[in-house]
């Protein structure tokens, strides 16, 4: 055991921690072990291991030495001389295997925690490179921008302007989720040095994330009870085009569209970008910042000054915000609205361009609130995954997401009628060909689940998972006075995880009851309703399956979105017990659950059903499922019988099949024909269609064009027995 401890810590090259272990062992033995290990640096396998762990200059030097030694031709005498060290190597390799199992326990006995190891790794390998990395990334912003600006022939705006297009309708742009910068205006002592600096959407914010995570999260989270600012903290959205033109250095968001608008004659007097604090629930946006009122006045001002109706151009969650705004502005003030009048939209808005909108929410909001996980975190493997979990783990991500009302506003809408029909479940996909995707009809009388609890190692089985009455959850939140009583919290969790499959209606019901431990006192849970009511209330304005479009016969809606990318649709979960969530099933029955109480079971894989690492995928744009981007546009708003489009607003839907390619001058993105959720903002075909709408030039060519199976999906939903009673 003493030898193994020294081996592990020597490979980590951590002198301080090795000294702590050495206290328990004989000093002479330590010297001997270190000498032996130094000799073994000649062996390529051991050097490779140290190089993998450390990747520092010393291991690289040792590797070169080992490679040189191995390339030399060995004589019989050399082979005989090497026999002893090679036997030692075999012992070392056995010890390394033992290390994988016994290291945590031995380190614990030595008083060395995994947090100590991580902090040492961070200090030695991450922090020294931060400043240099920021400088290089900052320099890349202007280079990428200059490259795009210099190549006029690539820009749809430049080309359509040569054909005669000119600016016509004023444009109001509404960004989506997380793409607007957030600035600190007041905060705790640890954050005062960041006054008016961007905590979100800049390299300086990323630097703060790595150098002072606790302070960073304290300022980025919202008060869970009020849904607004925590005491003594004010974080506000950046303003102007710069708020969302670029995100994190060279990662463009609205920059390309803005430049293409300029090509046809737009400038700051004919277009504006209305950034907002994307963390807030929509009602809090108006309550705290007066955003809806500002948006109304901006539209009215452009309409009056330019003499033309306005085009609302929204992306992602921004489209959901626009629908909420249209409901708000046409309602009377005593009903919680803006008092613009029933005909306000018809008077002021020419078109609503919905670009990759989260109209019916997105599946990934559910695991973000349940366990702080999405595909990107589950897919992290090896050291990167370990570092991420140690530094910014599931619990922290979950707690943060539950304070953001915006995440709740993007929970799937339409309930079991739409999401439970299973109409979009894929059997197979081939993103490299034009072969259409094939779908599996739902062979069940029960709603298709969005969460399935499983202890199985294969998703093809029908898993079962039961919880015993003595199961409890550990929680040490400092705000226990606002938390649910532990026994009540335990009962809610037991009930939810006692059934294998949970539909979207059941998941939302659990989230509302649980409230991340706050229950019904959680602000976001109170501000959103997902159940139809006899009377339309403000808590339903976020849901287009419950809230009709305004009466605006002259309004036009354009739905533009990408398809052909595997997108998160449903999840396989297991209970989270054991040190690293490594126990499940009956092994959890007598063990306290961790926080979060459930985690995605990444061991579940079934390629035939598009299940990878515990996540079931369906068609979409990589972030938002096709069911959300397309259903309302091709069915929900086009049927006369459901009352959701009372004035017959014209709906045009255009899908863009994802075609990815590498661009030397834009290496961080997926090419000019990408259908990716964010890349659609730079898709040349989408930009040309938008330019035609805002200029009125060749707008007659912007007609419905479908690439996906969305029409068949909506037909399956209609005929599904579960769907006859809700959206009809």
Image: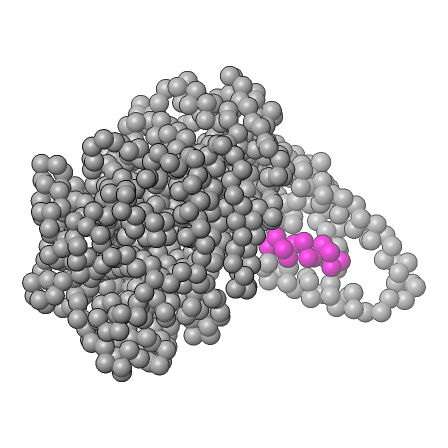
Q: Is residue 298 above or below residue 503?
A: below
Question: Overall secondary structure of the magenta stretch?
Answer: helix
Q: In which quadrant of the rendered image does the C terminus lie?
A: top left
Q: Is residue 321 visible?
A: yes
46 in the magenta segment? yes
Estimate the x, y position of residue 121 in percent, counting from the top left: 53, 50
Residue 425 or residue 357, whichever sits in front = 425
The magenta segment is 43-54
Observer-nearest residue: 438 or 352?
A: 438
Quadrant housing residue 365: top left
The residue shown at (17%, 55%) is 553
Horizontal arrangement in the rendering, residue 388 relative to residue 515 (left or right): right
Q: Residue at x 63, y 37 (%)?
A: 457
Residue furthest left in the image: 304
Left or right of 631 on screen, residue 622: right
Q: Return the residue found at the far bottom.
A: 162
Q: Position of residue 482 (x, y in %)?
A: 30, 25
Residue 589, image x, y percentages: 56, 22
* Above or below, 256 relative to 590: below
Would residue 629 be found to the left or right of residue 327 on screen? right
In which quadrant will I find the N terminus? Answer: top right
Instruction: Please say whether residue 533 is one of the residues in the magenta stretch.
Output: no
- Residue name at image x 25 percent, y 79 percent: 161
């Amino acid at each position: 055991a003493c030898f193994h401890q020294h081996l592990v810590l020597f490979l980590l090259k951590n002198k301080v921690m090795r000294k702590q272990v050495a206290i328990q062992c004989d000093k002479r033995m330590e010297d001997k072990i270190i000498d032996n290990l130094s000799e073994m640096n000649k062996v390529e396998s051991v050097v490779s291991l140290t190089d993998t762990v450390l990747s520092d200059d010393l291991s690289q030097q040792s590797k070169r030495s080992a490679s040189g030694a191995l390339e030399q031709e060995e004589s019989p005498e050399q082979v005989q001389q090497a026999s002893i060290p090679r036997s030692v190597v075999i012992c070392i390799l056995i010890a390394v295997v033992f290390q994988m199992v016994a290291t945590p326990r031995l380190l614990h006995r030595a008083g060395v925690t995994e947090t100590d190891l991580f902090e040492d790794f961070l200090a030695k390998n991450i922090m020294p490179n931060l400043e240099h990395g920021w400088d290089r990334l900052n320099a890349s912003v202007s280079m990428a921008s200059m490259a795009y600006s210099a190549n006029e022939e690539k820009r749809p705006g430049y080309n359509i302007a040569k054909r005669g297009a000119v600016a016509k309708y004023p444009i109001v742009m509404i960004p989506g989720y997380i793409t607007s910068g957030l600035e600190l205006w007041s905060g705790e002592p640890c954050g005062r040095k960041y006054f008016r600096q961007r905590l979100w959407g800049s390299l300086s914010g990323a630097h703060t994330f790595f150098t002072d995570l606790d302070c960073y999260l304290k300022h980025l989270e919202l008060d869970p009870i009020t849904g607004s600012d925590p005491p003594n903290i004010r974080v506000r959205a950046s303003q102007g085009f710069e708020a969302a033109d670029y995100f994190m250095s060279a990662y463009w968001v609205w920059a390309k569209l803005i430049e293409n608008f300029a090509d046809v004659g737009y400038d700051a007097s004919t277009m504006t970008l209305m950034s907002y604090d994307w963390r807030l629930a929509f009602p809090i946006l108006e309550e705290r910042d007066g955003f809806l009122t500002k948006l109304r006045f901006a539209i009215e001002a452009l309409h009056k000054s330019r003499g033309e109706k306005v085009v609302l151009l929204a992306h992602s969650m921004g489209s959901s915000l626009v629908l909420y705004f249209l409901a708000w502005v046409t309602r009377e003030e005593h009903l919680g609205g803006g008092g613009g009048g029933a005909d306000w939209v018809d008077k002021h808005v020419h078109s609503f361009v919905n670009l990759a909108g989260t109209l019916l929410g997105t599946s990934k909001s559910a695991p973000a609130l349940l366990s702080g996980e999405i595909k990107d975190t589950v897919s992290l493997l090896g050291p990167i995954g370990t570092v991420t979990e140690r530094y910014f783990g599931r619990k922290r991500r979950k707690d943060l997401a539950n304070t953001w009302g915006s995440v709740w506003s993007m929970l799937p809408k339409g309930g079991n009628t739409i999401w439970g029909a299973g109409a979009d479940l894929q059997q197979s996909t081939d993103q490299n060909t034009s072969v259409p995707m094939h779908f599996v009809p739902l062979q069940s009388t029960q709603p298709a689940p969005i969460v399935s609890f499983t202890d199985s190692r294969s998703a093809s089985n029908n898993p079962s998972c039961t919880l015993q009455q003595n199961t409890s959850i550990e929680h040490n939140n400092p705000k226990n006075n606002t938390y649910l009583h532990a026994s009540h919290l335990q009962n809610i969790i037991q009930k939810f995880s006692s059934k294998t499959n949970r539909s979207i209606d059941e998941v939302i019901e659990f989230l509302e009851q649980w409230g991340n431990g706050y229950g019904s006192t959680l602000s976001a849970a109170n501000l959103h309703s997902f159940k139809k009511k006899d009377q339309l209330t403000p808590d339903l304005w976020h849901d287009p399956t419950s809230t009709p479009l305004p009466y605006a016969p002259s309004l036009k809606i354009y739905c533009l979105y990408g398809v052909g990318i595997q997108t998160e649709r449903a999840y396989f979960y297991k209970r989270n017990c054991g040190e690293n969530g490594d126990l499940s099933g009956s092994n959890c029955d007598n063990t306290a659950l961790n926080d979060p109480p459930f985690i995605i079971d990444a061991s579940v894989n079934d390629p035939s059903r598009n299940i990878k690492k515990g996540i079931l995928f369906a068609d979409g744009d990589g972030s938002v499922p096709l069911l959300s981007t397309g259903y309302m546009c091709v069915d929900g708003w086009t049927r006369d019988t459901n009352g959701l489009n009372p004035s017959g607003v014209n709906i045009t839907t255009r899908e863009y099949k994802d075609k990815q390619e590498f661009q030397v001058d834009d290496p961080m993105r997926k090419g000019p024909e990408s259908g990716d959720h964010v890349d659609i903002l730079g898709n040349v075909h989408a930009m040309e269609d938008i330019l035609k709408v805002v200029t009125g030039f060749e707008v007659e060519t912007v007609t419905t064009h479908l690439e996906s199976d969305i029409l068949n999906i909506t037909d399956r939903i209609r005929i599904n027995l579960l769907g006859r009673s809700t959206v009809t």
